[in-house]
Image (cartoon, rainbow, N blue to C red):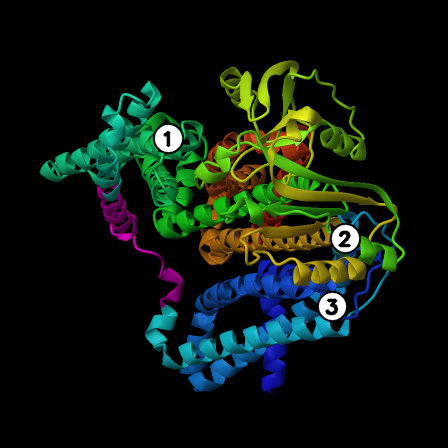
Amino acid sequence: MYAKLVFRNAKRSAKDYLIYIVTLTICVTLFYAFLSISSSYYQPDIGTAYEITTFSDGIKLAVCAITLLLLFLIRYVNSYMLRRRQKEFAVQSIMGMEQKTIGWLFFAETFLMGAVSIVIGIALGVLCSQFMSAMLLASYGQSYELTWTLFPDTVLWTVSFFTISFFVVGLFNVRTIRKIKIIDMLSADRQNEPDLKKNRFMPTILVIYLALSIWMLETGIQKMIFFFDPRFAFPIHILFWGNIMFPALTLLWSFTWLCKKKVWTLQTLLIGLLVCTVPNTVFSALVPVFESKYYLTLGAGTINQYLMFVVADLLFLICGIIYLSSSAIVVWKSKSPAHRYQGNNLFFFGQIISKFTTTTKTMTLICITLTIAILMFIIAPILTEWSMGYLDSRSMYDVQINSRYNNVDEEADLPVGDYELVTEFLVGEGIATNADCTFSLYLPNREDFHSRVKHEFPVVAISLSDYNAIREMLGYKTVTLEENEFTTQWHMAVTTDEQEEFIRSHAIVDTDAGRLTLSEQASHQEAMGETLYNSYTQVVYVFPDNICQNLLSVNRNRYIQISEELSYSDAAALENKFIKAYPELSENGVGYYIRLSTLQVNEAKGMNFILKTAMIYGAVVLMIICLTILSLQQLLDAGQYRYRFGVLRKLGVEEQDIKSLVRKQLSVWFGLPVVVSIIVSAIVVEYFLQSVSVEISAYIGIGALITQVSITISILILLLLCYFLSTWILFRRSITE
C-alpha cells in the first residue's frame, strides 16, 4: 500500500515540480559530462607531447567541490515541496497516519524523483561529454571524432554523489516532518518572508556598510601624505581627497538622518547613501589604477583594502537597488492613479507588490549570485586566453636556459659555460636541433654589479650578433648598427608611452667601453621571451659586438630549437637531469633555470582547461540555482494565483489579457535581478578590461575577446530563455487547472 502511495504521489509531484526535475537532470548531466574527461577509461589521442593525467585529478576535485552547491539547491527545493505538501500531510495526520510514516513516505517520493533524474541525467551526460571531449581536444590542437562511451567510474561517482545528497536531504525532511505541528502545516501556505517594513535584512546591511565607511575614512586619512607631497601629480591629490570626502559625506548623511529619523523614512536614508556610494566606488577603484600608473608606494595591503571597498560598494549598490525597486513600485502605485486604474494594471501591481514586498532578501541574494555567475562566465575565457597568449611570449624556444646573478656577490662567481649537459642529452636521445644560440648578457658599467639594489636592477645589454641570431631563430629580420650606436628591445606588455619616456632619458649611454648614441631605429618590440630581460626590467640594450667584448658578463643563457616536437617523457627527463646538475640556487648564489616548451605548454593547457572548466561549470550551477529559485517562487504559489486569475475570468477579462498579465508578471520577476546583475557585471568587466588593456592587446587581441564575450552572452541568454519559457508554460497551466 505504501509503495502505491509513493508512486502515486511521485507521479503527481512530477507534474507540479517539473522545474525541479528538469533542473536536477541538468545538474546530473553537467556533473557527468564535466567529470567524464577525468575518467581513467578516457584516453584521448593528444600526441606524445602532452600528458592528460597531469590534470585529471584537478578536474575531478574542482567539479566535485563546485557541485556541493547543488546541496543547497536540493535542500531549498525540498523545503518548498514540504511547504507545498504540508496541508496534505496535515490531513493525513488528522486521519490517523503517524507523522513518522508521512516523513518516510515523502523521503521515498523525493528519492524516487531523484533516481529518475540520475538515470536521465547520465544518459544525457553521455551526449554532453562529447562536447567536453571536443573542447579538450581543440585546446590541444587535435581533431575530434564522435565516440559513444559510458565510463563506469564516472557513473559510479555521479550515482554516489547524488544518492548521498538525496539521502542526507531526505533524512532532514523526515526529521522536519516529525517535529512540525499540525496547526503549522495547515497555515504553511501563508508563511513568507517578513513584510518589507518589518524585514531586518536591509537595516543590517546598512549597519555593516556604515562600519565599512568608517574604515574607508580611516584608510584615506592614513594616506594624507599624498595630498601635500608636491612630487605627485594633481590627479593623485584629487583621488585621495575623494577617498576622504565621500566616506565622510556618507557618515554625515547617516548622522543627519538619525537626527531627523521621525520625519525621514529609511528609503530617504538609502537614497542618499546610494548617491554617495557611486563616487565612493569610483575613487576606490581608481586607487589600484593610479598606483601602477604613477608608481605609488602604497603596498599590497592598501591596494587589497581598496579593492575590498569596491566590492562592498557594489554589493551595497545591489541591495539598495533591489530594496528601493520594491518601495518604488508601492509609491508609484499610490501616487499614480491614472496608471494604476489603466487596463489591468491594478491587478498587475497587486501581484508584483505582494511578491516583492515579501521576497526582498531572496531577490537580493539572487541578484548577487547572478552577478557572480555572469562575471565567471565572462572572465573565465579572458583569463585562459590571456594565459595562453602570455605563454606564447614565454615559451618561444623548445629549450630555454637562463641564469640569474641576483644573489651573487663576487665577479668570479658569475655564470660561465655552455651547458654541455643539454647537448649530451639531445645527442644521446637522437634529437636533432634546428638552431642553437648560447649568449651572455652584459652590464654597461661594471660598478652597477656592486651597487645594484633589489627592485632596481640595471638594464643589461646583448651583443648585436647574438641578438640577430635569436631573431633569425624566431623568423624576424636582422638589425644593423653603426659602431657607436645602440638600440633597445622591449617586452610586449610595455606601452608606447613608457618606451618613449625611457628613450628620452636614455638617448646616450655611457659604458665601460665608450659612449653610444641611440640608433634611428630606437626600439624593437617583437616577442623574444622573458628570460632575455634582467630582473625587474622590461628592456634590454643591443650593443655592437666590439663594445660587449669589454663589458662584464653577468648572465649566461642558451636557446635551442628542436627539429621535431619534443615528447613529454624526454622533456621531463631533460628537466630532471638539468636540475640535478644546475640547482635553482647554487652555492655561489647563481640561479639556473630551464624552460622546456613541451612541459610549459602541457602545464599551461592543463591548468587553463581546469580553470575554464571549473569557472564555466560553477557559473552554470549558480545560474541554475538562481533561475530555479525564481521559477519556484512563482510556481509554488500556484494555488493563490489560480484563485486570483479565476476571479478575473469571472469578471469578464479575456484570456488574451490574462496571458499578457502572466507575461508581464514573469518579465518583471525575472527581469529585475537579471538587469541589475548585468549592469553591475558590465561595470566590473569594463573596469577589469581597462586595468589590463595593455595585456589584452598583447596576449589576447580585441577580436578574440569580442568573440569570447559574444559566446558567453549567447549562453546566458539561451539559459535564461529556457527557464523563462518553462516557467511561463507551467504557470499558465497552473492557473487554468
Of the residues tagged 2 and 1, which is closer to the observer? 2
Which residue position holds label 1?
282
Q: Nearer the viewer, residue 528 or 102?
A: 528
Magenta: main secondary structure: helix
Q: CA distance from mark 2 to mark 1?
A: 56 Å
Nearer the N terminus, badge 3 or badge 2? 3
**Residues packed near mark 1 inside 10 Å, few (<14), some (14 to 19) or many (20 plus):** some
Q: Residue at x 15, y 36 (%)?
A: 257
Nearer the N terminus, badge 2 or badge 1? 1
Q: CA distance from mark 3 to mark 2?
A: 41 Å
- Asked which quadrant contains residue 718, the reply is top right
Query: Within the magenta stretch, is there residue 203?
Result: yes
The span picked out in magenta is 187-214
Is residue 7 left or right of 208 when viewed as pictured? right
In the image, residue 465 lies at what x, y percent?
A: 75, 29
Image quadrant holding the N terminus, namely: bottom right
